[in-house]
């Protein structure tokens, strides 16, 4: 079972960094690659990101007032 599955399908990216004990830049690069392969999805919320499994509904985290960046 992956950390995302254990946590209900989503985690804050900072929690992923803590879970794997790697630098935030290394985790970000790996997550970008996984996102390109449709293995995970990420949503930016202000200055943080939520990471989720592909079938997670992360849109509930986005404010309708924030633009996609």
Image (tube, rainbow, N blue to C red):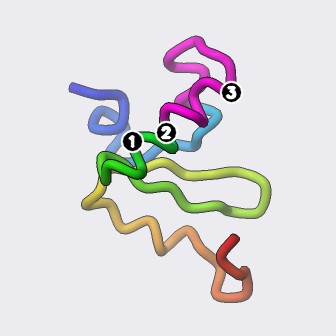
Residue interval drawn in magenta:
16-30
**Label number found at residue 34:** 1
Query: What is the magenta segment's predominant secondary structure?
Result: helix
What whole-number distance in Å separates the C-alpha atoms at marks 3 and 2?
10 Å
Disc 2 crowd, CA 10 A, few/some/many (<14, 14-19, 20+): some
The percent coordinates of residue 28 (x first, y second) are 60, 36
The percent coordinates of residue 43 (x first, y second) are 55, 61
The percent coordinates of residue 22 (x first, y second) are 60, 14
52 or 25, which lies in front?
A: 25
Q: Residue furthest bottom?
A: 64
Q: Tell me which label, 3 or 2, sits earlier in the chain.
A: 3
Q: Residue furthest right?
A: 47
Q: Which residue is mark 3?
A: 24
> Are the residues at dot 2 and dot 1 in contact (C-beta closer than 8 Å)?
yes
Image quarter of residue 67: bottom right
Q: Which residue is mark 2?
A: 31
37 or 59, which lies in front?
A: 37
């Amino acid at each position: 079972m992956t950390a995302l599955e254990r946590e209900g399908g989503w985690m804050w990216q900072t929690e992923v960094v803590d879970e794997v004990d790697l630098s935030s830049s290394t985790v970000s690069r790996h997550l970008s690659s996984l996102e390109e392969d449709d293995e995970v999805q990420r949503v930016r919320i202000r200055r943080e990101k939520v990471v989720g499994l592909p079938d997670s509904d992360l849109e509930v985290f986005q404010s309708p007032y924030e633009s996609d960046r």
